[in-house]
Image (cartoon, rainbow, N blue to C red):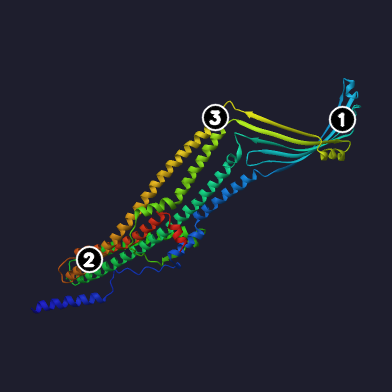
Amino acid sequence: MPRFLATVLCLAAATLCAAQEPPADTPPEPPKDPRPRVRYTLDDCLRLASENNLDLAYARLEPGLYEGDLIAFRGAYDPTAYITFNRRSIKAPTASALSGAPILDEDLWSGTAGVKGGIVSGATYDFNFQTERDFTNSSFSTLNPKWSSSYGVSLRQPLLKAAWVDYNLVSARLSRNSHRQSIFKVEETASTTLYNVEFAYWTLVNSIRQRDVKQRALELAQRLYEVNRNKVRAGALAPIEELRAESEVASQKEGIILAENTIEDSQDELKRLIRPFNAPADWDFVIEPADEPAFEATAVDPEAAISRALENRPELEQLRIAMESAKINEWKYGRDLLPTVDLTGSLRYSGLGRNFGDSLEGIRTSDFDTWEVGIVIEYPFGTRAARGGLARAEAERRRADLSLRNTEQTVVLEVREAAREINTTAQRIEATKTAVRLARRSLEAEQARYDRGLTTSHELLQFQKTLTEAESNETKAVIDHNIARLKLRKSTGTLLTERAGR
């Protein structure tokens, strides 16, 4: 009996001394990160992305390209003013007395000023004023010099091919459709950008929380290691138990190292989305998320969500416009197969005199006019260009229709998956909360058994791992629920409008 009491007292004293000594293998505290820390809410990140994201800035420039095309199209109907001057001198021998001189000498000055252009009906016009001065040595010329002036208008209007407003506005309609598509493309890019930012934000939050879970697991493992080491030194525990605990500490340290790397990757992805990289200092800071993921148990009506998606998704609007443009091209090339039948006409008033003023007086009286009406018919021997364009337009229209139907199916699939994921993650959250509560109670019970010497370090470590895994699953379930709600908003096309209204 005295020997037994002495042994117990020795063990207790050894344990007490070991507990008071600082653990020889306790790792030093990691150095504090010197980088500045910036605390961002989710709304902060979304605002910064709207202002700075390069993909979004690039997409916003595209509508301006088609606005330029529309201006250029209207410019095709701008009138053109023109002026021409010409002088012609003729000196030639004659073979007839009727020429009025043995050597005919003629000097001709002429000029024209006018305006010409086209209108959207396909017609072309030319309104001009002409004048010329003719001096000759011919004895038969009663006016020498002779001034002749005239003004008039000529018009050519297609009746079949390339005719009327609907045909000539095809280019404008296609440019307007491209402009509308580019606007929906901006909406699609903005929605995708906001989705990526929020996804990256919650991914960063999850990475930090997973690191925190591993740190708590490391603390448990270190406490167990210290207890086991003290017991081994006191001779109350086999050395293998110390090795097991030390191995677990090393394993948890590795997990924290990997978690820290994941956090850095998540931060870089979020920085890329909200702040362009121009110099290394631009990304030399630490993002601290200020928002916590929330759990909202909401019921989702898949059919209503699908209807909203088919109505709101900008990708579908782009494809509908593409199909409309393909139909326009198909109609245009069908018209190009028609022959050319153009109506032509002109009207001109002229005057003649010994000087320029006399020629203008003749014009003013409108006594001398010339008018002309005609029909021009052209039919090419081959229409391969038009038939080739028509075949291509028909193929584009069929492709656009198939692409629209395929994208609609993809949208429906995305909505259904997001709705199911919301319900699944909500159930996972409840299940993981229960699992964490039970794992914590089990670990406490196992710790009590271990303290009484009724179990081994190996068994206790298994309970610690179970708790760590349960806490990790709970954290991930909450994050996944927030991401599932995000996916539903994006898949229904309401993410941009919801964020704009906040």
Residue kind at label 1, given as amino acid type = Glu
Viewer-nearest of discs 1 and 2: 1
The reply to whether discs 1 and 2 touch (Cβ–Cβ < 8 Å) is no
Q: Which residue lies under the disc numbered 3?
A: 384
* Residue 84 appears in view: no
Query: Which numbered disc flags the more N-terminal residue, 3 or 1?
Result: 1
Q: Tell which residue pokes out farthest to the top in this image.
A: 95
- Residue 207, given in percent of the width and then of the height, sits at 36, 61
Name the one closer to the observer, 231 or 350.
Answer: 350
Res 106 label = 1
Residue kind at label 3, given as amino acid type = Arg
Q: Quadrant of the N terminus?
A: bottom left
**Corner quadrant of residue 99:** top right
- Residue 446, given in percent of the width and then of the height, sits at 19, 68
Query: Which numbered disc flags the more N-terminal residue, 2 or 3?
Result: 3
User: In percent of the image, x 85 and y 40: which residue is there?
Assistant: 361
Q: Which residue lies under the disc numbered 2?
A: 438
Q: The residue tagged with tag 3: helix, strand or loop?
A: helix
- Residue 2, given in percent of the width and then of the height, sits at 9, 79
The number of numbered badges drawn on the structure is 3
Residue kind at label 2, given as amino acid type = Leu
Query: Which numbered disc flags the more N-terminal residue, 1 or 2?
Result: 1
